[in-house]
Image (tube, rainbow, N blue to C red):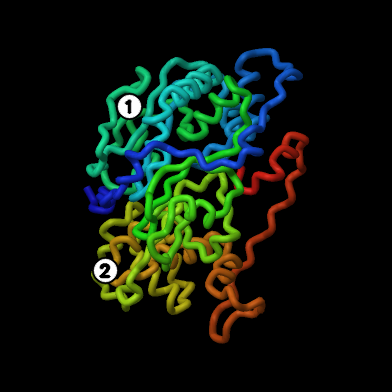
């Protein structure tokens, strides 16, 4: 078996945030939003659940998709419904912690999804390779079997569910299941999201239930900063995005974590030593070392030789790099170029310029055709304030 199929086993650093109770940090006005279900007219229980999910504006945190659309697509078709609590990135426990502390609501959400799908089988998916937890993950939660996914990071979707083969299935994040249960049984609209706040600059690492629209700085101040961070990451520790403006960056439906680190800048950005570790751990079997070099030298013709479009964005190449190079960022730029999104690649690499002319000696990037504007349906009016929802 080739080495890249094994991934990489990471130190998880989920404590002490994981074992602490989830605290609510919410705005009173948004937390009191209620659904008006008096005029709800549907023909079946399945349609009622789908309509409530639509009115509650629930977004699945695992993929950023509107839950009602996922339910509608699998209505009466799925054979199994799976709750995704697979936190395989270090520091992040914003799905496994709500699962253990709010298991009853998760089970209620699973039952509602099973009703829509027309099936009885359900399961919960967690990551097994976590060795630093103070609490044990039980084999069953609310009498629902817990699947433990083995192997290194990243635990890809194919590897997680390979034993199911082509069985039709619906996979929903734990947070979306909790909000679905609240919408149906408490008539509450989704106005919060579960996230982890951690890092070596955070005084009190913890999991929070935070109101949508709060700023990153507000959340960090809630947990306290022991020192000024040199990097703040919004999202996962491996796949998240470094942000500069914490005062204006808002919490969205897909914000899984806010991580604040202080790094020794002297350890970063050495030259590539050609060790090949990034190639050994890449789950897609790529050679990130050469792709990174091509990006640095603007050798765009070389991209097609190494298939950067197969990158899944896990970030293991940057994690394993002894020179602390931003390899994953280079591979992402190469992927965007090959897929025709070179305009965004150009903008990321040259944020300070507004000129659309290519540099001297550099080939002009290919222009991707603009997609036609989709006709807006009446139901999309509900989604105007959900920029991250699909």
Q: Classify 10 Å Cα crowding around label 1: few (below 14), some (14-19), many (20 and above).
A: some
Judging by the rendered image, the residue that carries numbered circle 1 is: 146
Direction from residue 123 to residue 321 in the image, left or right: left
- Residue at the extreme bottom of the image, as rendered: 360
Q: How many marks?
A: 2
Q: Position of residue 388 (x, y in %)?
A: 60, 47
Q: Is residue 72 left or right of residue 164?
A: right
Mark 2 lies on residue: 322
Q: Position of residue 245 (x, y in %)?
A: 55, 64
Q: Quadrant of residue 88?
A: top left
Evaluate whether residue 314 shows in this view. no
Q: Position of residue 303 (x, y in %)?
A: 44, 67
Residue 309, given in percent of the width and then of the height, sits at 46, 57
Above/below status of 214 relative to 370? above
Q: Which of disc 2 and disc 1 is earlier in sequence? A: 1
Q: Residue at x 45, y 33 (%)?
A: 174
**Which residue is more in the foreground, 131 or 5?**
131
Q: Quadrant of residue 187?
A: top right
Disc 1 element: strand
- Residue drawn at x 41%, y 18% is 121
């Amino acid at each position: 078996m080739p080495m890249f199929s094994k991934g990489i086993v990471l130190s998880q650093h989920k404590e002490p945030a994981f074992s602490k109770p989830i605290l609510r940090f919410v705005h009173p006005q948004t937390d009191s939003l209620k659904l008006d279900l008096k005029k709800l007219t549907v023909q079946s229980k399945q349609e009622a659940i789908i309509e409530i999910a639509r009115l509650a504006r629930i977004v699945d945190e695992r993929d950023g998709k509107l839950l009602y659309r996922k339910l509608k697509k699998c209505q009466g078709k799925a054979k199994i419904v799976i709750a995704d609590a697979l936190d395989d990135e270090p520091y992040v426990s914003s799905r496994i912690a709500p699962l253990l502390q709010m298991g009853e609501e998760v089970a209620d959400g699973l039952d509602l999804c099973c009703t829509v799908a027309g099936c009885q089988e359900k399961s919960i998916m967690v990551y097994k390779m976590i060795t630093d937890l103070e609490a044990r993950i039980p084999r069953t939660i609310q009498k629902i079997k817990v699947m433990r996914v083995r192997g290194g990071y990243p635990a890809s979707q194919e590897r997680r569910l390979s034993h199911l083969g082509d069985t039709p299935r619906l996979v929903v994040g734990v947070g979306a299941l909790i909000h679905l249960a609240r919408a149906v049984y408490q008539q509450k609209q989704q106005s919060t999201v579960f996230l982890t706040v951690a890092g070596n600059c955070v005084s009190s690492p913890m999991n929070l239930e935070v109101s949508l629209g709060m700023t990153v700085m507000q959340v960090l101040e809630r947990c306290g900063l022991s020192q000024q961070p040199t990097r703040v990451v919004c999202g996962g520790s491996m796949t998240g995005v470094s942000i500069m403006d914490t005062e204006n960056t808002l919490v969205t439906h897909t914000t899984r974590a806010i991580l604040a680190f202080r790094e020794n800048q002297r350890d970063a950005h050495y030259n590539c030593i050609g060790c090949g570790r990034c190639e050994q751990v890449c789950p897609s079997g790529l050679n990130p070392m050469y792709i990174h070099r091509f990006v640095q030298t603007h050798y765009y013709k070389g991209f097609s030789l190494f298939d950067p479009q197969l990158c899944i964005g896990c970030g293991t190449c940057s994690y394993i790099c002894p020179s602390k190079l931003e390899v994953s960022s280079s591979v992402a730029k190469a992927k965007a170029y090959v897929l025709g999104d070179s305009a965004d690649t150009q903008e990321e690499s040259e944020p300070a310029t507004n000129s659309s002319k290519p540099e001297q000696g550099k080939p002009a990037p290919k222009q991707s055709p603009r997609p036609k504007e989709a006709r807006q349906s009446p139901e999309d009016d509900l989604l105007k304030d959900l920029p991250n929802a699909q």
